[in-house]
Amino acid sequence: LDLDPTFGKHRSPLVQVLHFMRAMNLTMKDDREIELVYLAQRVGIEPYSSETPSNFYRTGFEPAGLMRKASLQAPEAELLTPVNLFGFFNAMSSLVHNGLGSCDWGIGSREDDPDDEDDDRRCDEDVRDGKHRVEAVLAWSPASRAPDAIVDELGLLLTAGRLNSNTKQ
C-alpha cells in the first residue's frame, strides 16, 4: 500500500475462511454439514447475522492512511481490527492443528454447552475426554515431496499463483 494504494485486494474474512477450507480439502468426519460457530467473535463476520440490511460494512468506508488520502473506499477493511485479525489467525491455526472444532479458539462446534466460551483455550485433555468435538480435518497433502514444489502448489492453491520469488524464500 505504501508504494501504490490502488494495488491489492482484501476479501471478507468469511470468504477467506471458506477458501482456505476448500483449498486444504476440508473433509468431514461423518455426514453432518459444516457448522461454523463463534465467527462473529473470532473474525468479525458471521453469515445471516448482519445488524443492518446493507450488509456487515458501512458503505463508503475509507481506511485511515494512504487509502483515505487517495479517496479510496474499502468497506471490507472496516473489519481489519487487531481483535479480528488475531481472532482470524487463532481460528486458522486451530483449524490447521486441531481440525474443525472449538478447541484453541477454533470456529467449530462444541460437544457440550456451545454458549460456554470460558474453556476455549484448553484443548489437550478436553479433546481426549470428548468435550471438544472435531467435525472435520484438513486432508490436503502435497503432490510432491520436493520443498520448492510444495511451496509452488501451496502458492497456487492459496494465492492463485501470485507468489513472487522473494515471497517464496
Image (tube, rainbow, N blue to C red):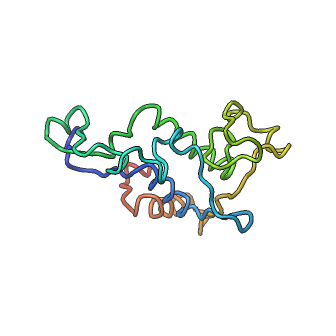
Q: Is residue 61 left or right of residue 155?
A: left
| Image x and y of residue 98, in percent | 69, 48
Check the image and report above or below for 83 versus 150: above
- Residue 77 occupies quadrant: top left
Q: Residue at x 20, y 41 (%)?
A: 3
- Residue 22 occupies quadrant: bottom right
Q: Residue at x 67, y 47 (%)?
A: 97
| Image x and y of residue 92, in percent | 56, 46
Q: Residue at x 49, y 48 (%)?
A: 46
Q: Nearer the viewer, residue 30 or 98?
A: 30
Query: In the picture, which quadrant includes the N terminus?
Result: top left
Q: Is residue 22 left or right of residue 108?
A: left
| Image x and y of residue 115, in percent | 67, 38
**Outermost residue, left side:** 70
Q: Residue at x 62, y 39 (%)?
A: 105
- Residue 140 occupies quadrant: bottom right
Q: Is residue 66 left or right of residue 18?
A: left
Q: Nearer the viewer, residue 125 or 4?
A: 125
Check the image and report above or below for 146 versus 81: below
Q: Is residue 41 left or right of residue 7?
A: right
| Image x and y of residue 15, in percent | 44, 56
